[in-house]
Structures are given as structure tokens and as C-alpha cells.
Image (cartoon, rainbow, N blue to C red):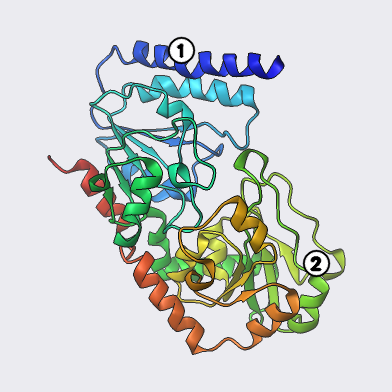
Amino acid sequence: MKKILKNIGKSLLFHGLFPMLYRWHARKPVVNNSVLFIEVRYGEITDNFTLLYEEFCKREDFTVEAALLGNSVFSYKEYIKACLHMLKGLAPAEYVFVDESSNVLAALPIRKETKLVQVWHGCGAFKRFGYGGANKLTEKYYNDYYFTAVSSPEVVDIYAESMGQNRDKVLPIGVSRTDVFFNQEYIKQCNKEIRDRYNIDRDKRIILYAPTFRGNVQEARSPRLLDTGKLYDGLGGRYVILYKGHPAVKESPKVDEEHKDFLIDASEEKIAALMCSADCCITDYSSLIFEYALLGRPMYFYAYDYKEYVTERGFYYGYDEFVPGDIYYNEEELVKGILRTDDKAVSRIDAFRERYMSACDGDSTRRIIDRLLAVQ
């Protein structure tokens, strides 16, 4: 009975109150050159929006606002309150950016004068999502976007299918947040700041360990942590590992006190800064591999739970043939792989980057804005 009442309440909110309030606020005309950024998951502006947000803020003829829904960090009550507040800013907005699917937005009768742009939070296409996911969506989570910006022609059809979009509206014009990986000053600054903050000697190489979460976003959990002792025995004198937990995971696994100067929890850092600082990267099924490929540095894939994960999520491509690096199922193999990295590994990354990230060249932010503001 409690579940039934909860579903009834949800239906009244999403299909009754929210659309009704949106229509109420939409009685007034759209405000010219008004821009709204809707952060669905988190309570702050993330890297997905930062460059676009800053660029619009520089333009004196635009008004810029942000709606922080925080559905993965706020309580349900706080989330609903944030959604109600968002409706007031959404209704008169001329340009709206989203970086995620949203059952709230999808329930609204968005006025035709508003241009809703999707700048998805992941580059390329790796794990199945949306309407192409392993677990088919039963609710509407995507709008009819003005356009969706993606990282290469290779992934256009995948995004069109997964979001239920006309493929002509899925544009391979790049991903805004990748522009930082072409800024050499930014890369150098990140490296210096990270090394200084964690007191990492200049002669030690930095490994970024950034696994994705397990389960669903609402109840995201960390994978098991690497066996620090085994890694330290093989790499401790030459490397430092920075662990970056997925932002959807509320509680990071405990780092071994004995090796706290070797494996450091850097989950509070921005992922872009950590990628720029790292000489190489260990991950599993994370889409950060697309961005990290832009730096041309080695990647190692620690997939101890591959069979369980692929059953849960599914991939668009065969994992073994897809990832631009060797796959490892235990720490001993992983250590050997890191120590024997060669030019062949880097060449695989070059081919991967060309296929999946060809539209990302350091100028994506400009192209997205130009396309949005272009006279039709």
C-alpha cells in the first residue's frame, strides 16, 4: 500500500503539478537572450557546463542562471523543492542547457520558443543508456532537444536511438568540457597544483585510478578497492596512485593507512584536473576513457567483475575489442602491465581518439554556442 501511495503521489507531481506550474509561469513571454543551465544530478555547476556558463557570463547582452536539482545528492524533499524553483526560471528562458536525462523536464510541455540543448555528461558511447539500455526505460526521460552535441560522427546513431531523437538533431560538433585538454597552460597548472597539494615528488609518476560506480545512480556504490599491498610491492618506489571515486557514490572505500602516501583518496578533486596530472590511468568501464584519450597517455583496464557488470549494464561494442588498452583481472597482472607499457599501447589510443573523439579539438564550446545562436 505504501508503494502504491508513493507512485500515486509521484504521478500527481510529475504529470499534474509540475506541468500545471510550468504553464502558469509560461503565460509570460520568453525573455530574449536568457540562458538557463539545469544541473540534474548535482548541487553545483559541473565541468559539463563550466566553459559554456563562463562564456555566456562574459557576454553583457545575456542573462545567465543555473538550476541545481541535485537528484543524486539532495534528499527527495530537497529535490522536489529545487524542481519547483527551477520551473519559474525555465518557463521564460530562451536557451536551456542540460547534461542529463530528466523525468521532470520530460514531463513538461516545453514551449517552442525555448531552445533546449543536450550536452551529455559522457563522451563517446560505451555503456548502454537511455532507450538503448540493458534495462529498457518505462518512463519518458528525454525531451525533443533543439540539438544534442556529441564527440564524433561514430556515435550519432547511438545517441539518436538512446535518447529517442531524430538523428539530424544529433550533431558531432564536440563536447565543451574537453576544450581544457588542449590548453597546455591549464594542464601544467593542474599538474603543479595536484603535486603540491598531495606532496608528490617530481620524480614519481602519478597513476589515476578512477573506476565507475556499481548499481544504479540513486544507490551507487564503489567497486572493491585495489589491493594496495600488492600494488605497492610492484610500483611503490616509482609511482603514486590518486583514487577518484565516482561523484554519485556518497561514501568512498577506506584507504589502507599503511600505504596512505602511496594510494591517496583524491575524490574531492575535479576529474579534469586529475586527468591532466596523471601519467597514466587505471579504470574499468568509465566513460572518462574518451577524454583521457585526448591526452594520449596509457590506460589500463581493471575488470575483475566484468561478467557481472556486462550483464547489468551492457555495452554498445565488444569490451575486449573496444577499450584502448589491455584488460586485467587481478593486481599482479596489472602491475606487470603498467611496468611494460610500450609504443603499441599509445598507437591504440590514437586510433581510438580518431574514431570516437574526432570532433573534440579545443574549439567545441565556440561551435556549440555558434550553432545555438545561428540565424535559422
Residue 365, given in percent of the width and then of the height, sits at 32, 53
Identify which residue, 351 or 194, lies in the foreground. 351
Residue 68, given in percent of the width and then of the height, sits at 51, 33
Q: Vertically, is 239 above or below 80?
A: below
Identify which residue, 200 or 160, lies in the foreground. 160
Q: Is residue 364 left or right of residue 328?
A: left
Q: Give the labeled residue for mark 1.
A: 16
> Is residue 54 in view?
no
In space, the residues marked 2 and 1 are separated at their CA atoms by 52 Å
Residue 45, given in percent of the width and then of the height, sits at 49, 42
The extreme left residue here reads 376
Identify which residue, 168 or 228, lies in the foreground. 168
- Disc 1 marks a residue whose amino acid type is Gly
Q: Is residue 23 left or right of residue 305?
A: left
Near mark 2 (Cα within 10 A), the count class, few <14, some 14-19 or many ≥20, is few
Q: Is residue 132 left or right of residue 78?
A: left
- Tell how many labels: 2
Q: Vertically, is 347 above or below 163?
A: below
> Is residue 135 in view?
yes
Residue 263: image quadrant is bottom right
- Disc 2 marks a residue whose amino acid type is Lys
Q: Are marks 2 and 1 in contact (CB under 8 Å)?
A: no
Q: Give the labeled residue for mark 2.
A: 260
Dot label at residue 141: none
Earlier sequence position, callout 2 versus callout 1: 1
Residue occupying the point 42% across, 24% down: 107
Q: Is residue 192 left or right of residue 220?
A: left
Quadrant of the drawing holding the C terminus: top left
Residue occupying the point 44% across, 30% down: 140
Where disc 1 sits, the SS reads helix
Residue 247, given in percent of the width and then of the height, sits at 61, 48
